[in-house]
Image (cartoon, rainbow, N blue to C red):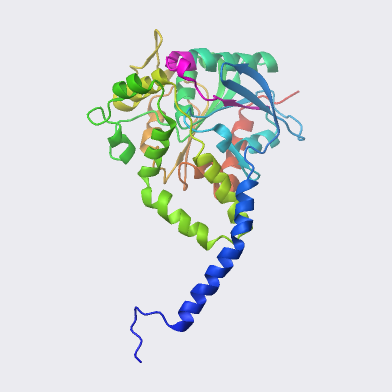
Amino acid sequence: MTTLPWMFTPADLQRQWDEFSRKLAAMPKAMEAAKNVRVGVTPSETVYRRDTLKLHRYLSDHPKLYDTPLLCVFALVNRPYILDLKPKKSVVAHFNDGGFDTYKIDWGVPSHAQRFLNMKDYIEGYLDDIVDHVRRRTGTDQINVLGYCMGGSMSAIYTALHPDKVKNLILMAAPVDWTSNEHLLARWTQPDVFDVDRLIDVCGNCPAEMLQGSFMLLKPISTMVEKYFTFYDNMENEKFLEDFFAMETWLNDNIPVAGEMFREFVKYCMQQNRLIKGELTVGDRTVDLGEIKCPVLNLTAEHDHLVPCGQSLPLEGVVGSSDYTSISFPAGHIGLAVGSKANRELWPKACEWLAERSDRLS
């Protein structure tokens, strides 16, 4: 009997059955890995609370070497433990173990009663209070700030408004210029297709489900098809399972964004691009990025589908700093924080950059 190219031979079917049997046998181990997943692994203590937010200070067996503390500011969308996902995939661990007194904000989950919190409340209220708390706690006039994604935009805004309180500024995948609308997220948020006023007027807060669904649809094949084939292929790989379920935990841990804050960020930054133009106001103050005169390290991801490099790199042309460093790294938006190569190559350089510009303990 002639076997056609598209037909399976008995040997092929046997191999497929044997593989399926191995995967089936590996299922209990995979379920155990999912049940025992641990994220946010670096020991920490809560040193400040206000409303739903918490400020965590990281503990370390390594001696503190620098007088200038570091505050990590994450976006309002997902949980901040992506900066401390697991051992050897932790941004904060690099700085914490490198001798910095390291803090991170957990914004918490805004309630329906907090839907009226706006940009002024977050930047001139919460963020300024946290910075002052860290300054008082450590006895320093200035602190270092690291901002990621939307948290980076907020950090840049804060530094422009309070340049006397920030010694060094590190931004990672932080948008400041929304001129280009060539990528998908920019097109989806254009005012002629996205009525943010109607969304917030109806929902109060921006729903977590809408945010998560939008992010998944940016790369639907990758997020809803390919990764499950990859999971099937690696079900017997214990290290893969640990990494996979840690990332899945974070990716599915979305939270809502306070309504007025979301409305203002979308309208004034994403749609009207006021920040880079010097037209953004926070309360009664206009944000001038030229007031950022401290050293700046701007980190971008070459394969970022959420914040393309073109949204971050124009910062160089508007800041007033004479000490500006930009690094574009071959990673995606999340890989910039948790990628093995980034943790091996990028973050040690970032720690060295910050160490050279921070005050050492006497």
* Span of residues in magenta: 101-122
Rendering coords of residue 204 (x, y %): 39, 20
Please say whether residue 109 is one of the residues in the magenta stretch: yes
| 213 lies left or right of 94 | left
In the image, farthest residue toward the top? 284
Please say whether residue 234 is one of the residues in the magenta stretch: no
198 vs 70, nearest the viewer = 198
Residue at (45%, 29%) from the top-left corner?
150
Residue at (51%, 60%) from the top-left corner?
232
221 vs 324, nearest the viewer = 221
Residue at (37%, 31%) from the top-left corner?
314
Residue at (43%, 17%) from the top-left corner?
115
Rendering coords of residue 320 (x, y %): 44, 21
> Can you see residue 308?
no
> Can you see residue 336?
yes
Whether residue 7 is situated above or below residue 177 in the rendered picture: below
| 59 lies left or right of 124 | right
In the image, farthest residue toward the bottom? 1
Q: Quadrant of the C terminus?
A: top right
192 vs 112, nearest the viewer = 112
| 100 lies left or right of 316 | right
